[in-house]
């Protein structure tokens, strides 16, 4: 299992710049179904010098679209300098939901031998330290980052995870050690209200919160954390990775346009 380094300064997140970030030409070595919605693509190819040290790093993947190539961001699930293929290997986990967009259309059909170009990460932000506990929240799109956050904090800070959405298999996405570390709690759409589940967690001003997934579901969570739970904004890292009815949402944009900080 890979490990991810901690910042040496309490509650600071050290940033590391990666030199030579460029577009890389990769080939699918293996396709593996993980859950009802998540598929893992193991890539080989131009991976010399690849680095991803932070739990929320992302690469840009370029998919064919109607008017040229379309870029989408993904957190690297795992990088192995020497993999089963005897060369470097990169795992990227993709949410597949039919042919509704360029990325899912590619992922629904791609298999061994298919090509993909990626770029990045340009840099990494390491996990902070010095918090009393950690709350991680994700739907399928945020699970690779959530898994990396678990591993970044393992053995150092108590972690709890809330997994939301309609994919009942998300708990099985985590390996046994990760599930034991984070005590994941499903919040399945139609069975649980995500905000109610978050309210039930041990959240204090000493809690670090990372959340990633559908923006509309996370906005009320963010408002509760800030306004009612009193979590300082510097303790929060919440991101809309996608939004219902919106194609190509920029996850760098404010999650809540009405309260952009």
Image (spheres, helix red, strand yellow):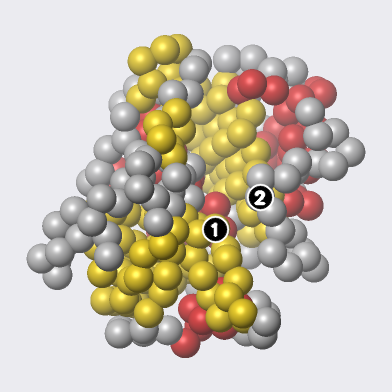
Up-down: is 226 above or below 70?
above
Tell whether 80 sits left or right of 254: left
Up-down: is 31 above or below 126?
below
The location of residue 170, given as percent across then percent down, is: 49, 59
Asked if disc 2 and disc 1 are in contact, CB closer than 8 Å, the reply is yes
Give the structural element (helix, strand or loop) at label 1: strand
The location of residue 10, given as percent across then percent down, is: 45, 12
Mark 1 Cα shell of 10 Å, populated few (<14), some (14-19), many (≥20): some
- According to the picture, the residue beneath numbered tag 2 turns out to be 251
In the rendering, which numbered label is found on residue 73?
1
User: Quadrant of residue 113 in the image?
Assistant: bottom left
The location of residue 212, given as percent across then percent down, is: 61, 47
> What residue appears at the point 46 percent right and 55 percent down from the top-left corner?
59
Tell whether 15 sits left or right of 247: left
Q: Is residue 175 visible?
A: no
> What residue appears at the point 58 percent right and 66 percent down from the top-left corner?
71
């Amino acid at each position: 299992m890979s490990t991810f380094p901690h910042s040496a300064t309490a509650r600071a997140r050290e940033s590391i710049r990666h030199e030579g970030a460029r577009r890389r030409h990769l080939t699918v070595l293996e396709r593996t179904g993980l859950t009802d919605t998540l598929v893992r693509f193991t890539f080989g190819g131009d991976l010399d010098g690849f680095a991803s040290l932070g739990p929320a790093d992302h690469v840009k993947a370029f998919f064919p679209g109607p008017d040229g190539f379309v870029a989408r961001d993904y957190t690297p699930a795992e990088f192995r300098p020497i993999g089963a293929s005897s060369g470097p290997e990169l795992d990227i986990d993709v949410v597949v939901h039919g042919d509704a967009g360029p990325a899912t259309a590619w992922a629904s059909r791609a298999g061994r031998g298919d090509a993909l170009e990626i770029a990045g990460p340009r840099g990494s932000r390491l996990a902070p330290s010095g918090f009393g506990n950690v709350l991680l929240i994700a739907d399928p799109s945020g699970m690779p980052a959530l898994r990396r956050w678990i591993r970044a904090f393992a053995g150092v800070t108590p972690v709890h995870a809330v997994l939301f959405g309609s994919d009942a298999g998300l708990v099985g996405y985590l390996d046994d050690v990760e599930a034991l570390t984070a005590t994941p709690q499903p919040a399945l759409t139609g069975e649980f209200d995500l905000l109610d589940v978050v309210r039930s967690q041990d959240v204090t001003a000493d809690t670090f919160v990372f959340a990633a997934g559908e923006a509309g579901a996370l906005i009320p969570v963010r408002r509760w954390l800030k306004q009612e739970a009193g979590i300082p904004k510097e303790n929060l890292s919440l991101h809309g990775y996608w939004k219902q009815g919106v194609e190509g949402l920029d996850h760098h944009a404010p999650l809540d346009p009405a309260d952009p900080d």
